[in-house]
Amino acid sequence: MIKFFRKIRKNLLNEGKTTKYFKYAIGEIVLVVIGILIALQINNWNQEYQERNAEKKVIADLKASLINTESQLGDLILIYKSNLERMNYVVDQLNSRRPLDDELKMSFHHIESYPEPLFEIGVYDNFKINSLQLIKNDRLKTAIIQFYEAQLPSIGHKLSNNMESVVITSLMPLNVQNFSYGDNAMMTPNDYERLLNNQQYFNAISYMSAIKEFALSEIQRVLETVKFLIDDVVTYQNQIE
């Protein structure tokens, strides 16, 4: 093609048609520029297409991760509710001064036990390092960052640190003094009658129960945040499809 245009220009010069030569040369330059612009536009389209597909994948992965976190939070709520029910059962049994039985022995350990949340953040860590710039919606991007960087770690620290402190400083010393540990998490009071009148033990139970109630409310609050965030992600996902 280049040889063809060059031959035309040469013929025009040889024939002395300088004006036509310059017109033709200008036309050729215009065609080359147009070709370059078209090539650049096609390249931009391809790049935008690739970025859109990459953004769609990031959004889909984040949605799956958030749904998994929602499920984990739901499970955690059920565990805390069950744990608090067993604690209330122990308090009711002791306050009513009912006879010691195996169910009560199996329930004492719920007072000092608590689940430690382990949330999935691998997808977000990868997103933060490699894909943050792909999400075009700044409001959604900010909400995702705040959730994974602040809210989710905060709930984990609140649950673990507060309860661990109470268990180590208050409950465990009392349990060592007042219980013998058996199989299947069974705890048998060394002196049941004395335990019934141990106000320090009742105070520790009450304090631990209050902390778990607070933890439960915090988990429920974060769960609502996750639900709203999932709705926002789904809405944006539909917009970019």
Image: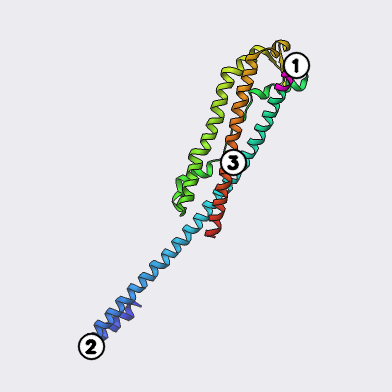
Q: Which of 156 and 17 lies nearest the eye of the viewer? A: 156
Secondary structure under tag 1 reads: loop
Residue matched to label 1: 97
Q: Is residue 68 visible?
A: yes
Q: Quadrant of the C terminus?
A: bottom right
Task: Please tell me in which quadrant of the rendered image residue 210 appears.
Answer: top right
In primary-sequence order, the first of circles 2 and 1 is: 2
User: Which residues fall within the magenta stretch?
Assistant: 91-95
122 displayed left or right of 27: right
Give the mark toward the camera: 2 or 3.
Answer: 3
C-alpha distance separating marks 2 and 3? 81 Å
Residue 4 lies left or right of residue 152; in this view the side is left
> Taking the image as drawn, is residue 184 in sight?
no
The image shows residue 48, relative to residue 192, as above or below, that is below
User: Which residue sits at x=59%, y=31%?
Assistant: 215
Q: Which residue is mark 2?
A: 17
Q: Which residue is mark 3?
A: 223
Q: Amino acid at mark 3?
A: Leu
Residue 205 painted magenta = no
> Reading the chain from its start, which is encountered first: label 3 or label 1?
1
